Image (spheres, rainbow, N blue to C red):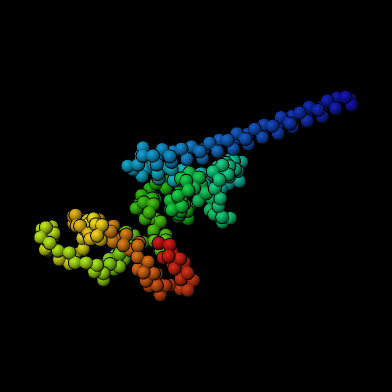
Amino acid sequence: MQNTTNSNNGNNGATATVVQNDTNNAAAAAHAASYKRIEQLIVEREVWEQGVVRTTNEQLYALLAQCYALYGEMCTGTAAAKALRDALDAVIAMKGYSFNKGTHTMTKIVKCVFGVDRRRVSAYSLVLREALTQKLAANAIAAFISSKGGVEEIRRSKSATAKTPAQKAALGKAAVGGEQLAVVSGVKLSEKIDVAKVGNDLVAIVTQQADGSLVVRALVHSQSVLNAALACAYSASKVVVQNDTANKEAANDDSAKAALITAAAAA
């Protein structure tokens, strides 16, 4: 009887070892599959970015939807969710990324998939976190982004300091409106001018000469070109940025002032 008992105990120990090995193997397989899934998202992003589907935003929105779905699957107590979280940590370690303690997991996923461009990571993460706030399903992400006018429109709508191109152009016009660097005239120049548009702004293409003079090559009447030039003038003018910030401060409480000044200085 003693020998029989010892034999049974030995069999139980072997069985426990087999079960433990099976459990470890299953966890390792789940981790490997999860890691491969994240890596596949990175590959798909690279394909999109290299121009295969650059003419459309559909692939981008599909990638963002997959990132969103990935996050949702991580937020459970299942073994599969843990495997995904571990895989994300492994990708982060492999790429050498570092995050603040309070960085949202959605931001971590976006950075791993889309790379280190801070502005892009911030915009994509903001869009997905807004979708999360609205409790959207992953299959509704593409329609949500399209309905809002795209990633940039959502980003601007959520930022207190972001400005649209039209707003920047208006501020740029204010920046240069009082300036008069030079007055240029000439017969050939007058032939290119529409007398019905006196007082309107336009863009001149000029070439700087060695003696400091400027040769006017062409006049551009396109409103979109003008807006782009004025937006650039706004971005280059620290004085206008600071004045614009001061006006905002007057309409906000004291707690918002420091953030607005910082945002203006970084523009």
Residue 17: x and y, percent?
73, 31
Between 203 and 167, the one lying in front of the other is 203
User: Residue 215: horizontal and vertical position, in percent?
Assistant: 20, 57
**Residue 245 drawn above or below residue 151:** below
Task: State how many labels appear.
Answer: 0
Quadrant of the image occupied by residue 191:
bottom left
Image quadrant holding the N terminus, namely: top right
Question: In the rendered image, which quarter contains the C terminus?
Answer: bottom left
Residue at x 36% of width, y 49% of height? 146
Front residue of 129 and 230: 230
Q: Residue at x 35, y 65 (%)?
A: 237
Residue at image point 36% right, 37% down: 52
Q: Taking 265 as reference, is 141 above or below it?
A: above
Can you see residue 96?
Answer: yes
203 to the left or right of 136: left
Residue 124 horizontal/vertical position (percent): 44, 51
> Residue at the spot x=46%, y=71% of the render?
257
